[in-house]
Image (cartoon, rainbow, N blue to C red):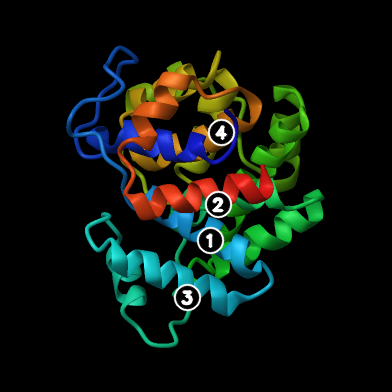
Amino acid sequence: MKGIIGAIAGDIIGSRYEFKPIKTKEFSLFNKKSTFTDDTIMTLAVAKWLINDKNSKEELVRQLQYFGNGYPNGGYGRMFKQWLSTENPKPYGSWGNGSAMRVSPVAWVGESLEEVQKLARISAEVTHDHPEGIKGALATADAVYLARLGSSKEEIRDHIEIRYGYDLNRTLDEIRPSYKFDVSCQGSVPESIICFLEGEDYEDTIRNCISLGGDADTMAAIAGGIASAYWEVPRDIQYKSIERLSYELLNVLIEFEDKFL
């Protein structure tokens, strides 16, 4: 299976390493503590927006607030928590990687790179309207879309570097020793893309992300969203991820797949 399941599985696998970082690729993918977090919740909120009305910012805000408040223990940042509880909420200048973690569905809906970028910008700017927050979402969406079209890794790398200025010519072995937890787009999106570029398959991409010892669930959601447009997500990873979703979240995933995939 390809699609947004890759972002969801990455989040679930990374969930137990977000605050317990490791610097190795040798670990079990799932255990009893593996669970979905805000990355999955917000990805499926974006998916529901696209199902209902992709041209309405009001619908996007409605779905983000509905799902965010429906799953209050998702692990949201302080500013986003305040946004969730605000009537007529406004963007708050965030450059955090929350804009990139939830963006992958737009790349399966847009029928051109231009439309994907338009939807990615909308998906980000209702909260993350800082230029870096928008750039992180755009770069991630572009990578997913290009992977979906069958572009090579070299083509994806070149496009992201030229258009967004990210340095993707570093290796994970160079990054890993000094890399630390970083929730900014500028400090985690390029590294997440590199995890995909160095990956041998979907699982290896996720292992790359966790091994950096950073914001594990979000980075694995970002890279996993790209990887699952490039490769198939193994069936056992699909099943072990899907069985951890609530009935409501699973229904959104199924509805999105039925409509767009």
State which tag comes first along the sequence, 2 or 4: 4
Asked if disc 2 and disc 1 are in contact, CB closer than 8 Å, the reply is: yes
**Kind of residue at badge 4:** Ile
**Of residues 158 and 250, which is closer to you in this image?**
250
Dot 3 corresponds to which residue?
62
> Please, what is the three-letter code of the amino acid marked with disc 3?
Arg
Whether the residues at callouts 2 and 3 have beta carbons within 8 Å, the answer is no
Q: Which residue is mark 2?
A: 255
Q: Which mark is residue 77?
A: none
Q: Could you tell me how far apart the alpha carbons at marks 3 and 1 are, in whole angstroms? A: 10 Å
Circle on res. 48? 1
* Other residues around mark 2 within 10 Å, as few (<14) / some (14–19) / many (≥20): some
What is the CA distance from the residue labelled 2 to the residue labelled 1?
8 Å
The image position of residue 149, as x and y in percent, is 77, 33
Query: The residue under label 1 is which amino acid type?
Result: Lys
| Gap between marks 1 and 4 measured at Cα | 25 Å
**Nearest-to-viewer mark from 2 and 4:** 2
Q: Is residue 241 visible?
A: yes
Q: Quadrant of residue 76?
A: bottom left
Residue flagged by tag 2: what amino acid is it? Answer: Glu
- Is 16 left or right of 220, judged from the image as shown? left
- Dot 4 falls on a residue whose secondary structure is helix
Badge 2 or badge 3: first in the primary sequence: 3
Asked if residue 185 can be seen in this view, the reply is no
Q: Earlier in the sequence, mark 3 or mark 4?
A: 3
Residue 162 % position (x, y): 75, 41
